[in-house]
């Protein structure tokens, strides 16, 4: 009768030992596993899934190989010695095949060990190549040069740069005011140039109109001939006759006075 409880107790103890010793480990999605034996990493990168290990002697360590995002701020100096405060964002991931390298050489902390210092160094080095105004006008070139430096440096540690962006450039207050004043002056200059061009166009239009009117008058004068004058006189006489009501004017004066027909008997 006592043997049954002993068997149950033995099974329970065995289960507890198995669970506590955990002779297996799981690598979840987006990770790779590095098995260490008494702290020494093995040479095989373990893929996602269940992997057996020797209890107490081996430990399954996880390395994140999914895309991760980091943002940071930093100060640098431009080529014209302007202080530039830059905020950047970086998307990166660990190459799955380099999981052991990242675990062993970077302590499985690539963000703090290599990425942040590399970003700061690249931003400072590239910013020093441009003036403050060029950093604004050539923002794409600045970003491309920073990315090129980062990819070269991080690739040696098994890290891939997926995306990099410059979130913002901030300058000193005096520099911002100088830029604003320059922009305003350029806008006023453009407006003055447009006004001058408009005035020139309008003047040319008036000259062209006056020239056309003068040419029209000259042509009309050339077309006036004695025959045309006589024709116009005849036309005026015809129009006067058509308008005459048959009454002679009741006036007198001159060498030959008009006869007052109305008063004749």
Image (cartoon, grey):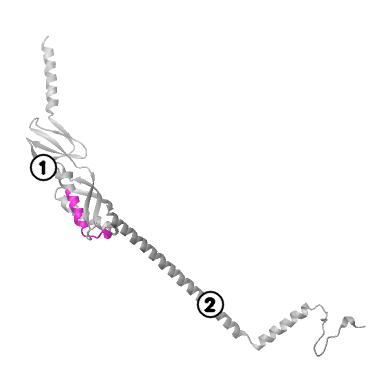
N-term-proximal mark, 1 vs 2: 1
- Please report the bounds of the magenta region as a residue range: 117-134
Quadrant the N terminus occupies: top left
Q: CA distance from mark 1 to mark 2?
A: 89 Å
Which quadrant of the figure has residue 61?
Answer: top left
Q: Where 250 sits versus 10, above or below?
A: below
SS for tag 2? helix
Disc number at residue 236? none
User: Residue at 89% across / 81% down in the picture?
Assistant: 263
Magenta segment includes 121: yes
Question: Which residue in the rendered view is the most extreme toward the right?
Answer: 265
Q: Where 95 sits versus 10, above or below?
A: below
Magenta segment includes 55: no
User: Residue at 21% across / 46% down in the picture?
Assistant: 92
Residue bearing the label numbered 2: 210
Q: Where 262 sits versus 255, above or below?
A: above
Question: Which residue in the rendered view is the most extreme toward the front?
Answer: 174
Which quadrant of the figure has residue 226?
Answer: bottom right
Where residue 265 appears, as percent x and y from the top left, is 93, 83
Residue bearing the label numbered 1: 104
């Amino acid at each position: 009768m006592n043997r049954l409880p002993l068997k149950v107790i033995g099974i329970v103890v065995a289960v507890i030992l198995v669970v506590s010793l955990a002779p297996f480990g799981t690598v979840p999605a987006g990770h790779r596993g590095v098995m260490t034996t008494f702290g020494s990493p093995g040479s095989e990168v373990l893929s996602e899934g269940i992997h057996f290990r020797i209890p107490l002697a081996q430990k399954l360590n996880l390395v994140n190989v999914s895309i991760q995002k980091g943002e940071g701020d930093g100060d640098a100096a431009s080529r014209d010695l302007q202080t530039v405060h830059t905020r950047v964002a970086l998307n990166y991931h660990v190459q799955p095949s380099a999981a052991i390298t990242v675990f062993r050489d970077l302590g499985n902390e690539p963000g703090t060990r290599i990425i942040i210092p590399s970003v700061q160094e690249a931003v400072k080095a590239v910013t020093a190549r441009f003036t403050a105004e060029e950093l604004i006008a050539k923002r794409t070139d600045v970003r491309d040069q920073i990315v090129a430096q980062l990819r070269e440096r991080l690739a040696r540690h098994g890290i891939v740069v997926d995306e990099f962006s410059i979130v913002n450039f901030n300058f000193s207050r005096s520099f911002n005011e100088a830029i604003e004043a320059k922009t305003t002056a350029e806008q006023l200059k453009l407006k003055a140039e447009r006004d001058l061009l408009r005035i020139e166009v309008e003047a040319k239009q008036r000259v062209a109109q006056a020239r056309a009117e003068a040419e029209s008058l000259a042509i009309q004068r050339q077309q006036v001939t004695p025959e045309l004058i006589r024709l116009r006189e005849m036309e005026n006489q015809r129009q006067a006759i058509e308008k005459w009501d048959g009454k002679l004017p009741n006036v007198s004066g001159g060498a030959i006075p008009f006869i007052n027909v109305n008063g004749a008997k």
